[in-house]
Image: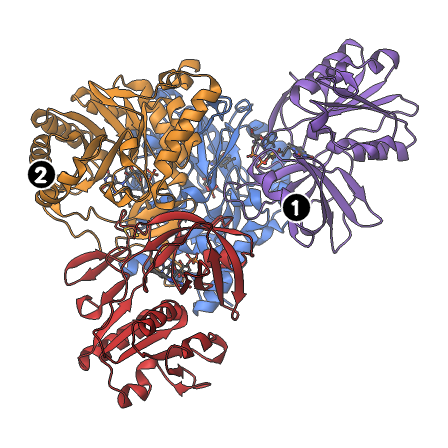
Chain colours: A purple, B red, C blue, D orange
Amino acid sequence: MAKRIESLNITENKRLNKDFFILELSGKSKIPDMKPGQFVQVKIEGSPGTFLRRPISVHDVNYGQNTLKLLIQIAGKGTETLSRLQPGDILNIIYPLGNSFSLPPEGQNVLLAGGGCGIAPLLFLGKYLRSNGFQPDILLGFRNTERIIEFNDYKEIGKVFLTTEDGSQGEKGFVTQHPVLATSKYDRIYCCGPDPMMKAVAEYSSKNNIFCEVSLENLMGCGIGACLCCAVDTVRGNLCTCVDGPVFNTKDLKW
Amino acid sequence: MAKRIESLNITENKRLNKDFFILELSGKSKIPDMKPGQFVQVKIEGSPGTFLRRPISVHDVNYGQNTLKLLIQIAGKGTETLSRLQPGDILNIIYPLGNSFSLPPEGQNVLLAGGGCGIAPLLFLGKYLRSNGFQPDILLGFRNTERIIEFNDYKEIGKVFLTTEDGSQGEKGFVTQHPVLATSKYDRIYCCGPDPMMKAVAEYSSKNNIFCEVSLENLMGCGIGACLCCAVDTVRGNLCTCVDGPVFNTKDLKW
Amino acid sequence: MVKLDFKIGDLHFKNPVLTASGTFGYGLEFDDFLDVSRLGGIVVKGITLEPREGNPSPRMAETPSGMLNAVGLQNKGIDYFEKNIYPDLALYKTNVIVNINGSYIDDYITLAGRIGKLKKISAIELNISCPNVRMGGMAFGTNEKSAREVTRAVRAVYQGKLIVKLSPNVTNIVDFARIAEEEGADSVSLINTLLGMSVDVKTMKPALSTITGGLSGPAIKPVALRMVWQVARALTIPVIGMGGIMNADDAIEFFLAGASAVQVGTASFIDPQASVKILEGIESYLVEKGFSDIRELIGLLNKVH
Amino acid sequence: MVKLDFKIGDLHFKNPVLTASGTFGYGLEFDDFLDVSRLGGIVVKGITLEPREGNPSPRMAETPSGMLNAVGLQNKGIDYFEKNIYPDLALYKTNVIVNINGSYIDDYITLAGRIGKLKKISAIELNISCPNVRMGGMAFGTNEKSAREVTRAVRAVYQGKLIVKLSPNVTNIVDFARIAEEEGADSVSLINTLLGMSVDVKTMKPALSTITGGLSGPAIKPVALRMVWQVARALTIPVIGMGGIMNADDAIEFFLAGASAVQVGTASFIDPQASVKILEGIESYLVEKGFSDIRELIGLLNKVH
Ligand SMILES: Cc1cc2nc3c(=O)[nH]c(=O)nc-3n(C[C@H](O)[C@H](O)[C@H](O)COP(=O)(O)OP(=O)(O)OC[C@H]3O[C@@H](n4cnc5c(N)ncnc54)[C@H](O)[C@@H]3O)c2cc1C
Ligand SMILES: Cc1cc2nc3c(=O)[nH]c(=O)nc-3n(C[C@H](O)[C@H](O)[C@H](O)COP(=O)(O)OP(=O)(O)OC[C@H]3O[C@@H](n4cnc5c(N)ncnc54)[C@H](O)[C@@H]3O)c2cc1C
Ligand SMILES: Cc1cc2nc3c(=O)[nH]c(=O)nc-3n(C[C@H](O)[C@H](O)[C@H](O)COP(=O)(O)O)c2cc1C
Ligand SMILES: Cc1cc2nc3c(=O)[nH]c(=O)nc-3n(C[C@H](O)[C@H](O)[C@H](O)COP(=O)(O)O)c2cc1C
Ligand code: FES
Ligand code: FES
């Protein structure tokens, strides 16, 4: 799908909690086909400290309504500025960017594992898997109750399992400590979250010989493969997070 | 009066026409005494291109209601950003800055001449003169009807005379061409407007031996006499527009 | 219609808007966003003889109105370039310029020789900001002797147009520009990035894996413009200006200061269409100001002052 | 309570936040906004032997995240300073440092001698960015020979603490820092402004009356930080860092890179209380990170790398 640069309208800005919000965007022209794992490069207006665009995963797409959702965590000045956008405001984005999660072979047992703002691409991925006949389980990890992001939408995709580090909800500990990993046998794990979580999941997968894809974060200059600022060290040498990724098979990564 | 730095609340943003608007500000603590001709240094938030503060004259003060008004022309990025402020927003200013127009000796016949955004300090000056027993005439010049700024408030101060360059309202031509200058005899002229207007008025005053004060514009780094960026060439050497001015007697200026 | 073309020697450019090396990939990355052939030319990313992996992550940091990069010339080397990239580049209907880099003078000589055989490559941009390994790691471009040597060596083996790209990290850039001219360069381009640094106060570590890196973007525009102005007054060969050009007004500042052409760098990251928008903006400006040829604008500041 | 003090030789500073010359007037301009005596010190605006009118208007231009100035050392000369300003300065309960400037070495010598007689002045900041008239207008600070001469000459006549302020417009600032140290400077401060330029495309004229001017503000921070890091690794005398410090985090970057103290410049224009806010922010940072003495922070980056 050809990349494009476009100004979309904000149709909704829904605050989930202190740190998270969802922007719904709608375009005048038909939005392009997107694949789960792809991202958009967002231009931030009116934020003096924010010079470059910011990469944000596609959280959800509704082709019928011609809308697109981004789930964003306030991490600094740029995302803070985005959190103040109002319906009617305009957001300039470059999209769709990056590769995508691969479709599993028929009949495979799939787990989606995510934490923090890393759950963003998993909704779109889950819906995509469902529409292709899979019934993924979903395992979400959060620091504590306060940090939990509403996950009702995920329940429509499959069974949702929860961990919190302090045990205030769900199982106590990290996602890799959740008992479901012992009781269920997964053929594939798709993971997105903080680096330590992805590394733990990658290690678990490797030990148990499970196919595992992660969506990496990295600082980005351009998002389109032009600047080579987003290098990630792989068995095939330095690759670009933005065009060769953000989704990588963990066996390719030199972690 | 001690200078201070303070965040005031916007209580009103009134759009006058395509280019002009009036901001009304109100503080939690009592606003300081200000004198006509003084200005404030405004901090502009959320405007990436605007690094330094912007100097804006005090347009009007209401000590009873603890409010202060700024009349602003959209000249570039900074003022454009200010034009989008809403009631409830906050504006950080440093004030009161600069010297002020001098009070005339009793019984003098006074003219206030202004054009464009230069009319801003004249309302406050006019009210001040009125409260000190003077009955100034007011001569306002604009490019054309479209550019005229509402001047009802000025009518309460004294007789208002109008010129437009295209003659679409009032007398045709520049302020110095208005017949009132021939029919009335003024002892003093206070002028603020575009450079060419102030120069013309200064020349007229000098020829007719009239005391004349102008309020100069200049680029400012600090507004408090610290950077020496706002030099103006005078018979006493380079002076600072921000602390030695903005009001200067035209006979001191090396124009 | 305003005339926008310019020449380096007998090499014709249909307009003076080029893209800067390392910021426009091989052009191909931008095909979705604009018709690359509309530009006056593109300078492709820095190439070396052997493949280079570049520096470890993190390779970039954002700074006030700018960015630091420490890419470290990651590229697949000249062999790969000839075989896999050149054929695509040859289809563009505009000048394609190759930015060459090396640690030894011999690297530059070999590279220039190989590029000289590629018909479609209009010119070489000789990047002398690389550390000169034989001279103890000081960049070729910050030492007069090695700047002269490398320019002379490349000039001797390369018949095409030679553009020397100057480093701004020097006391007097005019000295280096003069050396380039004396040694037969057809043009100079400037500025490359300013050497800068950034620290992450949360982690108390340098923001870049290499600690220092190259500063680009609007932050450096005043420095770039000053250097272009100084160099344009001192040389007779055309000067290509760059450094923080984000829009047409920025580009026009460079023309007024004496640049015959400009390169758009970091701007393409924020808006991949920046280069063509700048081209269109320059055209409108000329029309508005009543110029019929961009040559009337070039160095106007020098004429007045 | 965290320890914030630092020393240049035996000169004690209660904390490492100073204000930069030319950006804080004589301190007095800021009395309405803050208690100047809370600062570690103030460096007053550049002084010359004779009164100077400075440059014509326009003297400043805004640039992306920065500003250009061409004040041209406007000041009323040493006589006026001694008589009219010094008595007020003497009341501050903090270190007052005088920034001295000249076109000839003799100017510097005379000035340093006169300042040496003023008890309350803790130190001289030797600004070598002025054009050296005898050396053909090249700034003292961009020529190794004249930098050495002027430092040596001032050192010979001045018994107080001598801080040499370095120009960033050089190929290798470490060379100049070493010269200062070799010639007996007690400290170096850096950076002065980068030479830059801006053009008004509406009028097609330079934005400054002098065409080029000094660039300051956040735009130059990455360059300043890189230079402070380089110099701090090379010298044993304390380094005072500045360039684009707007908040405590910026200042902390400089400490991590090896600065023993910082100067706040352009920031005071935007927020006259910036210097004390930065001081308070540094203190909070140290508490938060569990440091009890700012010395633990200084050069932490150099220790790790
Ligand atoms: C492919 C990709 C997809 C992403 N998807 C999402 C998403 O769906 N939702 C979401 O909330 N966030 C997502 N991120 C992360 C998001 O890009 C950063 O949080 C954002 O750029 C921070 O910008 P800021 O200006 O708010 O913070 P800044 O002030 O720039 O930085 C705040 C902190 O965040 C870190 N940071 C900045 N940029 C990045 C980055 N690109 N990656 C990782 N850390 C960064 C900085 O080092 C700093 O510590 C994604 C990142 C990538 C690379
Ligand atoms: C003492 C003083 C009092 C002032 N009072 C008022 C007032 O009451 N109302 C009002 O609308 N304006 C006033 N001005 C002018 C106002 O400060 C400028 O219009 C404003 O700074 C422009 O900012 P900007 O970011 O919108 O424009 P920019 O994008 O910075 O510049 C737009 C254009 O305006 C010019 N300009 C910028 N700053 C100034 C300046 N300080 N003086 C003159 N020209 C400038 C620039 O050269 C440029 O051509 C006053 C100026 C001074 C010095
Ligand atoms: C990510 C990045 C990579 C770069 N790579 C190169 C390079 O390989 N060769 C080169 O000569 N210049 C390189 N440059 C410098 C640019 O070509 C240009 O000189 C500089 O960025 C200033 O222009 P700008 O401010 O418009 O970006 C690079 C710049 C950036 C930002
Ligand atoms: C308006 C202005 C005037 C200055 N005058 C002097 C001066 O007289 N002597 C001097 O050594 N430095 C002078 N400087 C340089 C500053 O002291 C400082 O080195 C520089 O601005 C970088 O710091 P900053 O980015 O924090 O402003 C001046 C800077 C500005 C902005
Ligand atoms: S962000 Fe530029 S290449 Fe990936
Ligand atoms: S604006 Fe700084 S001295 Fe006047």
Q: Quadrant of residue D163?
A: top left
Sort mark 1 into few (<14), some (14-19) or many (20+) by Cα contacts within 10 Å. many
Q: Position of residue D32 (x, y in %)?
A: 30, 44
| Nearer to me, D147 or D119 | D119
Q: Secondary structure at mark 1?
A: strand
Q: Which residue is mark 2?
A: D107
Q: Chain of mark 1?
A: A
Alpha carbon of mark 2 to alpha carbon of mark 1: how far? Answer: 59 Å
Residue, x 19% and y 77% (percent of image)? B206
Quarter that holds the C terminus of chain C: bottom left
Residue, x 18% and y 37% (percent of image)? D89
D128 with respect to D20 (left or right): left
Q: Amino acid at mark 2?
A: Asp
Q: Chain of mark 2?
A: D
The circle drawn on residue A93 is: 1
Q: Secondary structure at mark 2?
A: helix
Q: Position of residue C67 (x, y in %)?
A: 49, 36
Residue C206 seen by the camera = yes
Residue, x 54% and y 22% (percent of image)? C56
| Nearer to me, D81 or C155 | D81
C122 with respect to B54 (left or right): right
Q: Position of residue B214 (x, y in %)?
A: 27, 69
Residue B132 to residue A16: above or below = below
Number of numbered discs: 2
Confirm or reject: label 2 Cβ below 8 Å from ligand 4.
no
Sort mark 2 into few (<14), some (14-19) or many (20+) by Cα contacts within 10 Å. some
C78 with respect to B141 (left or right): right
Residue C265 to residue A233: above or below = below
D126 with respect to B175 (left or right): left
Q: Position of residue C235 (x, y in %)?
A: 31, 48
Q: Amino acid at mark 1?
A: Ile
Residue B192 seen by the camera = no
